[in-house]
Image: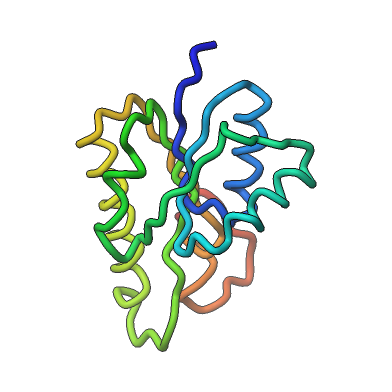
Amino acid sequence: MDQEMVLVTGGTGFIAQHCMLALLSQGYQIRTTLRNLSREAEVRENLKTGGAEPGDLLSFVAADLGSDEGWAEAMRGCTYVIHCASSTPSGNYATQNDWNKPAVEGNLRVLRAARDAGVKRLVLTSAFGAVGCGHEPLNRPFNDNDW
């Protein structure tokens, strides 16, 4: 395989690291984003625990969903993006918009950067927090209608 580059956002996350393990097993070159590059060794160690030693197949770029900085660099040369990063709530939220606005703006940053870089395909992941937080608990299981 030509080593196509895949950007996996949110490289410290559980889902992102499992995506990276699967991509490495298929021979992809990976770039991942971290809010803080000081966590690179942690990510490499977790991947090693998962059975992969990516060496030069893995690179890191500092990028935060709350800022435009780093996203153009992160996307450069990537064919695909798996967007696992999520905005990290901090502080008190008075309204649902206080919770949703940073998430929407962060996702739009990633989508625009991918478009501008000519990325071929982007996959957006989500988490339980997208539906399970920010409102009163339900007395029934969540289903597709709750998203």
Q: Nearer the viewer, residue 38 or 51?
A: 38
Quadrant assignment, res 140: bottom right
> Is 23 left, or right, of 48 in this rendering?
left
Q: Nearer the viewer, residue 118 or 60?
A: 60
> Is 75 left, or right, of 147 in this rendering?
left
> Is 130 left, or right, of 137 in this rendering?
left
- Please, which residue is most extreme toward the front here? 56
> Is 136 left, or right, of 98 in this rendering?
right
Q: Residue at x 61, y 21 (%)?
A: 27
Q: Measuring from the top left, give residue 139's x and y in whole percent.
A: 63, 71
Q: Measuring from the top left, give residue 104's x and y in whole percent.
A: 30, 59
Q: Quadrant of the C terminus?
A: bottom left
Q: Is residue 7 visible?
A: yes
Does residue 143 sit above or below 113 in this rendering?
Answer: below
Q: Is residue 145 visible?
A: no
Q: Residue at x 23, y 44 (%)?
A: 112
Q: Measuring from the top left, give residue 30's x and y in whole percent.
A: 51, 35
Q: Measuring from the top left, give residue 84's x and y in whole percent.
A: 49, 49
- Please, which residue is most extreme toward the left here? 116
Q: How is the image coloured?
A: rainbow
- Please, which residue is most extreme toward the top here? 1
Q: Nearer the viewer, residue 32 or 18?
A: 32
Does residue 110 sit above or below 39 in this rendering?
Answer: above
Q: Residue at x 56, y 60 (%)?
A: 128
| Number of callouts | 0
Quadrant assignment, res 1: top right
